[in-house]
Amino acid sequence: MPSDASVRWGWLKAMYIYTFFGAGGFGLGMLFFPGTIQSALRFPPQDPVVLGLYGSFLLASGLMAIPALRSPLKFAPLLLIQLVYKPIWLAVVAIPLFLKGQFPLYVVFISAVFLTYIIGNLIAIPFSYLFSKK
């Protein structure tokens, strides 16, 4: 591992662990226990294909976090993907609902979780390393 002082190794590994348990666990639940997830968070009826697609993406992210613990910098794009899609979802889906005065439990829950990932990834991602010309 490079000893670059701008890399926050602890944060980087913590976000991979969080991704493994958070995204991986939720993805596993969405794929194998969709009814439980839907009733626990009061999700409206979902197209099983769409639910399975997102569940597969989350599970894949969680599984990719395993080798990321061994080579944190090589897998930083995994965190970067999260840092891009989560704010897009908040801006396009959650915030418009909140501005209409609608606060479904599942949207509030997902928004809160997404904010923890966004903040954690902003701290953990070594942007200077990722975007350097080395």
Image (cartoon, grey):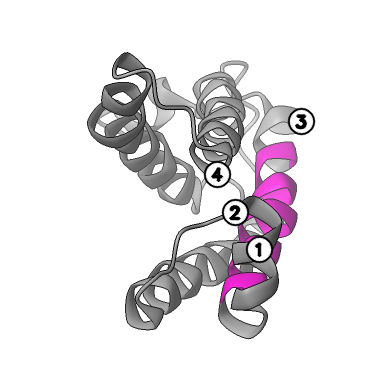
Give residue 52's mark.
none
CA gap, disc 4 to disc 3? 30 Å
Mark 1 to mark 4 CA distance (whole Å): 10 Å
Residue 37, percent across and down?
A: 65, 65
Crowdedness near tag 2: few (<14), some (14–19) or many (≥20) residues, C-alpha within 10 Å: some
Q: Identify residue for label 3.
A: 10
Name the residue located 38 percent from the left edge and 20 percent from the top edge: 98
Residue drawn at the location 56% of the way across and 17% of the way down = 6
Q: Is residue 127 visible?
A: yes
The residue pinned by badge 1 equals 39
- For label 4, the residue is 106
Q: In what element is the residue under mark 4?
A: helix
If you read the primary sequence from the N terminus, does the residue marked by circle 1 or circle 3 appear first?
3
In terms of image quadrants, where is residue 106? Answer: top right
Q: Nearer the viewer, mark 4 or mark 2?
A: 2
Which part of the image, by quadrant, shows the N terminus? top right
CB atoms at circles 4 and 2 under 8 Å apart? yes
The span shown in magenta is: 14-30
Q: Secondary structure at mark 1?
A: helix
